[in-house]
Image: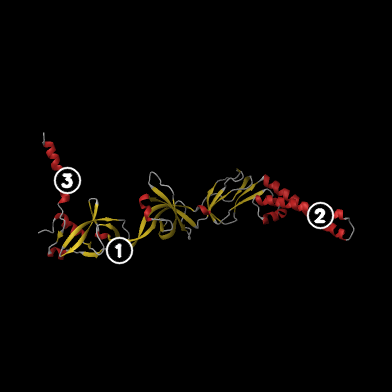
Amino acid sequence: MNKPMTMLAFVLLFIVTPVSVFAVELQLTPAQLANASLETTAVSSRESLTQLKLNGILTADRRRTHRVAPVVDGLVTTLRVVATNEKVRKGQVLAQLRSHSLGQAQAGYLEALARFELAETERTRIEGLWKDGVVAESRWLKVDSEYKSARATLEARRRLLSLAGLSDQQIRQLAKQPDRLAVFDLISPIDGLVTRVEIESGQLLGVGQVAFRVDDLSTLWAVVQIPVASLPQVSTGVAAQIRVQASPGQIYRGTLESLGGAVETLSQTVSGRIVLANPDGRLLPGMYAEVTLSGMASKGLMVPASAVFRLGDQNYVFKVLGNGRFEPVVIETGTATGGWIPVISGITADTNVVSSGVAELKSHWQYGAGSE
């Protein structure tokens, strides 16, 4: 009846025993010490700047994104830009509309302009006759009133055209270009790249309906997902280096401008937005990017990464005791950066530790090769 329990105890003893057989201290013979390629380093306080490597996706800078939409309704008669990824210049005509409402407003302006010019001519003529005493003052006052009314009507018509998107120059040219009546130009407000075309020839557009999207790609955003555990290492304003497959030898530089205010439940990450310059125009929205964020600067005890080894779930270093003697010491560490590992606890400053030849010492320690 006791055999199963005896066997279980034996198995548990076999599993646990190896961890306890390692010596607390390692002693190398003079011959072993002479043959070992060991180097030592004193634990010291150093300043470090952590680096966080992330994957990101490039997107357009929304502060430099423009949606082109008409301020009058109309029928698309001419489509100058028909495909995305076409570069355009500021003021370039993207499409033309035929707008009945605009045509009526333009005709009303031209009618008001004709009446104003007639009233202005009549006012000038009557003013001279009134000053010469040929006509009565009441006639002059009536003509002057008609002139002011015509001027006010003309200004109101001009404002309507201005609200419809026509420039002062376009308004002045109306009388010389009667064939342009009812024609509305959709123009690019910036130098940029057309990233969306929403219309077709013959389509009826309403007021405010988006026809094109034009992006200024002189700057872009790199959107990254930062693990919650890494948030203490970063803050807004830190520098970022970005690499893309399209230009593997080129490093683009930017700045972490903002961090999201909420954690994504499934991935346990926070969204970060990096603003980067795109001077050569090679970066495009949608590209995958390798992002390296410079973390928070910190100062503390550090050891070379080569000095630390892991056994089970603990990190160790070999403390130098002298005369061929070494002590494996458990340490608590931070995140490695630049070939150095921060030490949170376990050893103190100025302690000498083995920084090269650690694997050989570990073998002696584990398998007892140092004992005679």
In the picture, measured across the screen, residue 286 lies left or right of residue 53, that is right
Q: Is residue 45 visible?
A: yes
Gap between marks 3 and 1 measured at Cα: 40 Å
Q: What residue is disc 2 on? A: 144
SS for callout 2:
helix
| Farthest-out residue, top | 1
Which kind of residue does numbered mark 3 sit on? Ile
Q: Which amino acid does label 1 sit on?
A: Ser
Residue 36 pos. (x, y %): 17, 63
Image coordinates of residue 208 in percent, x first then y, are 60, 46
Q: What element carries label 1?
A: strand
Q: Nearer the viewer, residue 277 or 317?
A: 317
Q: Can residue 180 be seen in this view?
A: no
Determine crowd level at label 3: few under 14, some 14-19, many 20+ residues with C-alpha closer than 10 A.
few
Q: Name the residue under label 3.
A: 15
- Of helix, strand and loop, which one carries label 3? helix
Residue at x-position 86% and y-position 53%: 138
Who comes first in sequence, dot 3 or dot 1? Answer: 3
Residue 360 lies in quadrant: bottom left
Instruction: State which quadrant residue 172 falls in.
Output: bottom right
Which mark lies nearer to you, 1 or 2?
Answer: 1
**Structural distance between the alpha carbons of marks 3 and 2:** 112 Å
Mark 1, residue position: 45
Closer-to-camera residue (118/138): 138
Q: Which residue lies furthest to the right in this view?
A: 134
> Which amino acid type is shown beneath numbered disc 2?
Asp
Q: Is residue 276 left or right of residue 120?
A: left
**Going by the image, does 231 lie left or right of 318?**
right
Label 1: how many Cα within 10 Å (few below 14, some 14–19, many 20+):
some
